[in-house]
Image (cartoon, rainbow, N blue to C red):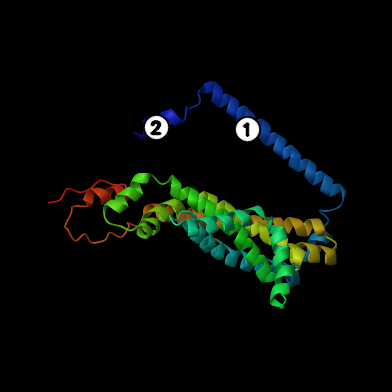
């Protein structure tokens, strides 16, 4: 079955196609190397590879005073915003899937509104506008976290909703057939499968969230861009070197997030959780419906 499917979905390249692919790979590889060499030479002409510009990164004070505090600001804001965004997305995706219009319509308005507002404008409003209502200054940390939560949570709500719609209808129908309520079907059957199916989209949005913490420097939040690039570069006159180090840290941080998501995806696929099955008082045989929910084959009742 799988070999037939592979043959339909993917036509294996012949000798000419393989030769063409090899040639194109070499050409693009050489072009990439040439581009990197040109960038290196341009920076070298401006003296950006001078040892004096990179020497501060060999001193512990550079890391303890600038880079690590900035990295901690980025990680802490991103971590809290990730958790809140996932909760926000889950709650409002369920709201948009509700049968009750008084819950579905407001949820849709909230999601569409915060998806439409630019994140930077949202942070500005939270940081400068909320104090007019509360008569208390808004901490930059929470302005960044709330802005990230509202925007990315709205995007994740749509991702969850799309994932639920992508689950075959027979899954929910089988759950109803064995006496499960809609809330049980949603939480035990649809959302777990939707989360697994949409995991690449969720991870991509969380990576965007990590990078968007850099917008916090506009409102004075001390994160990696402000401390590790602006402040450090201004103090040592090595803005390009500081930016390259910060880029490396962002890449490492997002690569770690992607790796963790890959491990989580493999674990969830190996250990899929079966839904809870309510007791049927009338003694009806529900093995066929349960098999449809699990995607397996019902064992014969003996």
User: Which corner quadrant of the image does residue 134 belong to?
Assistant: bottom right
Crowding around mark 2 (Cα neighbors within 10 Å: few <14, some 14 to 19, many 20+) is few
Q: Looking at this view, name the residue that lies furthest to the bottom.
A: 136
- Which quadrant: the N terminus? top left
Left or right, 240 with respect to 17, comes to right
Q: Residues within 10 Å of mark 1 (few under 14, many from 20)?
A: few
Residue 37 occupies which quadrant of the picture?
Answer: top right
Secondary structure at badge 1 equals: helix
How many labels were placed on the picture?
A: 2
Say above or below: 46 vs 127. Answer: above
Seen at 60% across and 57% down, the residue is 152
Between residues 290 and 22, which one lies in front from this camera angle?
Answer: 290
Q: Can residue 221 be seen in the rendering of this structure?
A: no
Seen from this angle, which residue lies furthest top?
16
Nearer to the camera, 193 or 31: 193
For marks 1 and 2 on the same chain, the one whose residue lies earlier in the sequence:
2
Question: Which type of secondary structure does the marked residue at label 2 adopt?
Answer: helix
Give percent across and percent down for residue 29.
Answer: 67, 36
Residue under the image location 59 percent in, 29 percent down: 22
Identify the mark at residue 25; answer none if there is no mark. 1
* Residue 242 at least partly seen: yes
**Where does residue 24 sit, x and y in percent of width and height?**
63, 29
Q: Position of residue 164 (x, y in %)?
A: 44, 50
CA distance for labels 1 and 2: 28 Å
Which residue is nearer to you in this view: 282 or 52?
282
Residue 97 lies, in percent from the top left, at 46, 54
The residue under the point 72% across, 78% down is: 135
Q: Nearer the viewer, mark 1 or mark 2?
A: 2
Q: Which mark is residue 5?
A: 2
Which residue is rendered at x = 34% and y = 45% of the image?
170
């Amino acid at each position: 079955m799988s070999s037939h499917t592979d043959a339909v979905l993917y036509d294996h390249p012949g000798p000419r196609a393989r030769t063409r692919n090899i040639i194109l790979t070499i050409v693009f590889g050489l072009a990439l190397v040439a581009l990197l060499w040109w960038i290196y030479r341009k920076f070298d002409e401006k003296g950006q590879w001078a040892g004096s510009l990179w020497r501060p990164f060999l001193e512990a004070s550079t890391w303890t005073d600038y880079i690590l505090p900035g990295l901690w600001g980025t990680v802490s804001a991103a971590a809290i915003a990730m958790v809140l965004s996932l909760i926000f997305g889950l709650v409002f995706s369920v709201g948009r899937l509700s049968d009750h219009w008084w819950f579905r319509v407001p949820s849709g308005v909230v999601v569409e509104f915060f998806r439409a507002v630019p994140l930077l404008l949202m942070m500005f409003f939270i940081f400068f506008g909320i104090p007019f209502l509360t008569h208390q200054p808004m901490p930059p940390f929470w302005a960044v976290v709330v802005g990230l939560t509202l925007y990315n949570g709205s995007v994740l709500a749509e991702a969850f909703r799309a994932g639920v719609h992508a689950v075959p209808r027979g899954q929910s129908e089988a759950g109803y057939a064995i006496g499960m309520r809609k809330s049980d079907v949603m939480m035990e059957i649809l959302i777990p499968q939707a989360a697994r199916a949409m995991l690449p989209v969720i991870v991509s949005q969380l990576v965007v969230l990590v990078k968007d913490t850099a917008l916090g420097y506009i409102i004075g939040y001390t994160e990696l861009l402000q401390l590790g690039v602006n402040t450090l570069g201004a103090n040592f006159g090595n803005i390009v070197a500081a930016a390259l180090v910060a880029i490396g840290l962002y890449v490492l941080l997002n690569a770690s997030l992607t790796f963790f998501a890959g491990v989580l995806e493999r674990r969830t696929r190996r250990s899929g959780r079966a839904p809870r099955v309510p007791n049927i008082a009338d003694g009806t045989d529900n093995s066929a419906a349960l098999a449809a929910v699990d995607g397996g084959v019902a064992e014969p009742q003996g």
